[in-house]
Amino acid sequence: MIQEAEIDRRYSRKVTLSADLVITGGGLSGTCAAITAARQGLKVVLVQDRPVLGGNASSEVRLWILGATSHMGNNNRWSREGGVIDELLVENMYQNPEGNPIILDMILLDKVIQEANITLLLNTAVYELEKADPDTIRSLKAFCSQNSTTYHLEAPLFCDASGDGIIGFLAGAAFRMGAEAREAFDEPMAPDADYGELLGHSLYFYSKDTGKPVKFTAPSFAIDVSKEIPRFRNFKANEHGCQLWWVEHGGRLDTVHDTERIKWELWRVVYGIWDYIKNSGKFPEAETMTLEWVGMIPGKRESRRFEGDYMLSQRDLIEQRTHPDAVAYGGWSIDLHPADGVFSERQPCNQWHSKGVFQIPYRCLYSRNIKNLFFAGRIISVSHVAFGATRVMATSAYVGQAVAVAAALCKRQGVLPRALYEQGHMVQLQRELMKTGQYIPGLVLTDDADLVARARLTASSTLAFSGFRRENLRWKSLDIGAAQLVPLNAGAVPVFSLPVRASGNTALVVELRVSSRKGGFTPDTVLATESVALAPGMTDLELDFKAVLEEAQYVFLTFLGNPEVQLPYTDQRITGLLSVFNGVNKKVSNNGYQQPPVGSGVDEFEFWCPQRRPEGQNIAIALADPQLAFEPDNIRNGVDRPVTGPNAWVADPKDADPYVSLEWDTPETISRIVLVFDTDADHAMESVLMTHPERVMPFCVRNYRIADAAGNVIYQKTNNYQTRNIIVLDEPVTTDKLMIHVGHPSDDVPAALFAIRCYGGVQ
């Protein structure tokens, strides 16, 4: 095609797009917001200035996705985030247990393009906006570097999930940058000027062993880390990727406008590290290793934080305060870093955990002065100290899902974000969120549209838990304290029994513990103690604590550490049952016991955490009185994970064809069925670098079928691995009975269901 050669000035192509919601930022918060909003029926434009989705989780940065589970190194049991981020993590686990970041890129892109309501703009940066009035955004302008196109993006609602808050900044939204003084929110952890007010950036590298000698010549800009990096002796030849999270810089600079400068300094450090590993002579094991990948953009921790109608602060987290507008939760430690980063003489981080998860209120998710602007991700309305816990990606993604459902409700109600709170729509928002799989601590889903609420529930069998089987026991030394989490009914605590082995004359101390906080999993209250004298060899223990529980709850049957004792473990695993250990997890500053500085406003307590599979077997205890904690009515109690109890129906392992039956007095027309299975919300599912022993969680029902009153199979599935199965029937079924047949996942794990929900129309 021949075009005119000369003209005074040319303009890039212009395209106008209109949507219900424009989301800026394709990190996990923006991605989860976009998917959720699209499924809520909103037309969405997702604008991402990078070539891939995922932000810090993408192949461009390669940080593992974590949230409340915190590497399974805290007391937040069954706390992995639900909804879309759970769907993504479970999908990545199935397709990518090796943790390949390229495959994660693919999964995120695939999930987004499957949603017809999403228009995805990659390599497209927002640079300007227009306002309808001083408090309202009308449209955004964005430019795509790859197709030389300027986009004009119009919508009634906008979500800033950009990390640096470019939309909020351009719009004039109130924001903060740096740390508040201690007095601002009564935060004892507020840092002083010496520690610094901002967290820096990190940039990672990957190495690999080629099997033959490899030489490396450092670039001219590499620094001598042995002279400039105080912690240079901590480097290891086999450590790479986000294991080097502490290679951090930029906290003394402007973490928005100085990002390129910070990146160059990090490149100087990274290539200096590799030069030291390869050429210092102190790492002979690195002789055959090569540098496979170095990040091109740094992973950014902190820049702007925007002000909503509420600012979450330290006491909200540590005291686990409740909020009437709770829409999400967090559970990462308050994780602050010295501003000098890798150049600091200080410890690379300062992590202090709360005793459990904390609520995040809706009022933190919209601008206090720009009427149609939501926030998602790390820029939400929190203090610098609270930011230390809310900034991590799974928490950010969870917030994104809350924003998306709120945006859909704004459209249905014809209101702006603040009005959802001020006009009393919080119960409706919370209900709609929970229907998307969003667990909100302390809340229960009550849904009048769910036909299961008025059905008669029966089951082919129900597990009456009286202990684990005793075949093929594994014997393990009690080098550190071990405990079995057991859900007990209200009333007298049953007598526990188990065999133990001793290598000599010794005393075994066993405590019956509970959490002082309802629904918590920090065993900080001792109800009773037994000290048992053991002789060498096998002893059959009977433990009668003579305790009474006022309500059904979890107890910790706690065996204090004694290396002369061995406990029996079983490969049998059951939904809602778990063993925990008073061990150490250095990844999250867990030394078995949290002892914070005096006056820090942080609790002192023990950590009791699970082991990763293939370890983490249950202690082979028996109970004199069977516990009825797995009844079929659990599937409609509105909680889809273990909290104060298992909240699941579990079939008897001996039942060859377990099923749940739903019966109605008159026929109901059903078009949509939701099933919620157990994909082990206690497993952290880190997305990259760390590998996992399985693709499918061992508790997850793989095969099931649904039949009507006449026995006709209306739906069946094989090889399921996802938590939530949403079944939209090709043709609605009118029946007065449904039977959901679920196969046992394995001989070691009985079938379980957290929830069944049935709807007569589009919900």
Image (tube, helix red, strand yellow):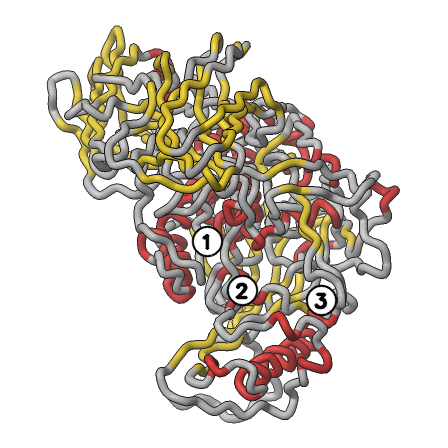
Residue 307 visible within the image: no
Q: Amino acid at mark 3?
A: Gly
Residue that badge 3 annotates: 341
Q: Residue at x 75, y 61 (%)?
A: 338
In this picture, is 577 found above or below 352?
above
Q: Is residue 663 left or right of residue 29?
A: left
Q: What's the amino acid at mark 2?
A: Cys
Q: Which residue is mark 1?
A: 686
For the residue labelled by badge 1, is the local secondary structure a helix, a strand or a loop? Answer: loop
Q: Earlier in the sequence, mark 1 or mark 2?
A: 2
* Separation (CA) of disc 1 from disc 2: 11 Å
Nearer to us in this view, 667 or 27:
27
Which secondary structure lies at badge 2?
Answer: helix
Marks 3/1: CA distance?
A: 24 Å
Foreground pick, 537 / 241? 537
Q: In this orientation, does residue 665 appear?
A: yes
CA–CA distance in space, label 3 to label 2? 15 Å
Q: Position of residue 149 (x, y in %)?
A: 51, 71
Tag 3 secondary structure = helix
Residue lying at 58% horizontally and 31% vertically, measured from the top left: 522
Q: Is residue 422 above or below residue 631?
A: below
Q: In the image, is 339 to the left or to the right of 481? A: right
The location of residue 612, given as percent across then percent down, is: 42, 47
**Callout 3: 10 Å neighbours few (<14), some, many (20+)?**
many
Q: Position of residue 469 (x, y in %)?
A: 27, 27
Q: Residue at x 36, y 33 (%)?
A: 537
Q: Position of residue 640 (x, y in %)?
A: 42, 29
- Front in this rendered view, residue 355 or 503: 503
Q: Residue at x 81, y 48 (%)?
A: 190
What residue is disc 2 on?
242
Q: Is residue 157 above or below residue 200?
A: above
Chain-order first, disc 3 or disc 2:
2
